[in-house]
Amino acid sequence: MMIIKRPLESVVVIDRQGDMGVFDTMNDAIESAHIAQKEYSKYNISKREEIIESFKNELRNHIEELSMMTYNETGMGRYEDKILKNKLALDKTPGVEDLNIIDSEGNNNGSFYELAPFGVIGAIAPSTNPTETIINNSISMLASGNTVVFSPHPGAKKVSSYTVQLINSAIIKAGGPKNLVVTIKEPSTNNTNIMLKHEKVIMICATGGQNIVKIALSSGKKTIGAGAGNPPVIVDETADIEKAAKDIIDGCSFDNNLPCIAEKEIIVINKVANDLKKHMSKNLALEIKDKEILKRLERLLITKNGTLNKKYVGKNADYIMNSVGVKIDSNIKVIFVEVDKNHLFAQKELMMPILPLIRVLNIDEAIKVAVELEHGNKHTAIMHSRSSENLNKFTQAIDTTIFVKNAPSYAGIGYGTKCTSTFTIAGPTGEGLTTAKTFARKKKCVYADSIAN
Ligand code: COA
């Protein structure tokens, strides 16, 4: 605690120590993370692992609480899916094992590469996966020896602060330094700008909506940008249609379609389209055929100036339908509508359990439409097919960071598979699925012997 005197002789108490990593000002948060990084840089890999394990173990006791807090604070998604997402972040984010010393030029060539920390990383976290991103980024960034300042989305500030406090108290309890992970009480665009410009923040990692990622990319610092996707799923005539329908509904409805990897539009070959629709309906999806109701949905979800009505992002299907005066069973997971590729429901990433379906004549048309709708985000694409030729054609054409074959989209972030997980998928800046290695500098060390030779 520090006491400063104001001109009017009033005495104000300012907590520059932070409250378990949560600070009043961005400058104090950064300075504290900077001091912490100096101390942390003395920790070897196994000590770092101990630190990371300490907070992972603590957070495992709070998964339900964090999931409920997120649901209550953001009003988006599904509590039970948030539990699964938090578990994924805790259990499947690679830690120090992702780092290794790389022999640069074969054996005994007198040099090797070492992976070193950047220092203090400024991380922007979204409201769609707030705790998952903080957990995932903290594991990756601390594993490579950095400390991290989070600028969370203002719409998830309470649960984000609480997550940072849990991480800090666990690290301190385990004998580690304070302030390895910090944040601010009142996140805002202004505070984010302070972070982007601060000389002690060496690297930026922005996970969020398009605007905030764009702002981060103009910081002039090394920036990892993980922004929006609009993942298309293709179903061709060779697919197991029954399985495809179930996988699509499971993936699309996961946390009410909030994940950036979730199926956002279906492109299906005409020959199997009706069969697919029939099986989707068996999996708690409801088709809206009535043109008048579709019009009402369009007016509700897209504003007059063509932007997304954010009020409905991550809401349940029955809530959305109620809002256009249609009562449906609350068990319905997804609403689907048949539209053409230019429809705004297909062109825009809705992040709602509203799934446009586009009929095409053949695989070439399907791929063309899917590539157009992905908008070059290089994020995620999904395909259901038994034809390796078609699968290869689509992978090559769409060139996304994640390509999921014959499974729900969430397989791409490790759910239901043996893969590792990340919540920061950096398409635009090319790092792809971020891990500890992404946040490490490659240094070369040359032995005296090799110089003499
Ligand atoms: N820190 C500080 N400010 C932030 C912020 C952050 N982490 N994230 C957003 N903001 C700011 C925005 O710049 C915006 O400021 P402005 O009004 O001055 O322009 C404001 O907070 C509102 O943010 P925004 O996200 O645009 O609006 P919203 O809260 O109404 O929208 C969503 C909610 C969910 C629709 C939107 O955040 C979104 O599209 N998220 C996608 C996230 C995503 O999936 N990313 C990819 C993950 S891999």
Image (spheres, rainbow, N blue to C red):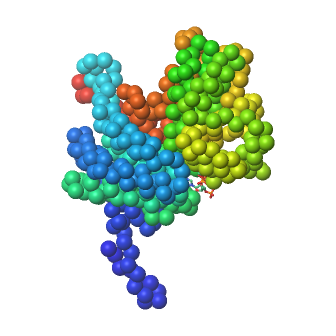
Above or below, 23 against 139 in this view is below
Above or below, 369 against 138 in this view is above
Quadrant of the rendering where the N terminus is positioned: bottom left
Query: Does the image show residue 61?
Result: yes
Residue at x-position 30% and y-position 30%: 100
Q: Is residue 421 left or right of residue 351?
A: left
- Please state the total of marks drawn on the protein image: 0
Of the pair 300 and 12, the residue shown nearer to us: 300
Residue at x-position 33% and y-position 32%: 98
Q: In this view, does 307 lie to the left or right of 448?
A: right
Residue at x-position 40% and y-position 85%: 11
Of the pair 12 and 293, the residue shown nearer to us: 293
Residue at x-position 71% and y-position 31%: 338
Q: Is residue 158 left or right of residue 330?
A: left
Horizontal and vertical percent position of residue 409: 51, 30
Above or below, 160 against 266 in this view is below
Horizontal and vertical percent position of residue 151: 48, 55
Above or below, 85 against 366 in this view is below
Horizontal and vertical percent position of residue 162: 39, 59
Quadrant of the rendering where the C terminus is positioned: top left
Query: Does the image show residue 217?
Result: no
Horizontal and vertical percent position of residue 286: 63, 36
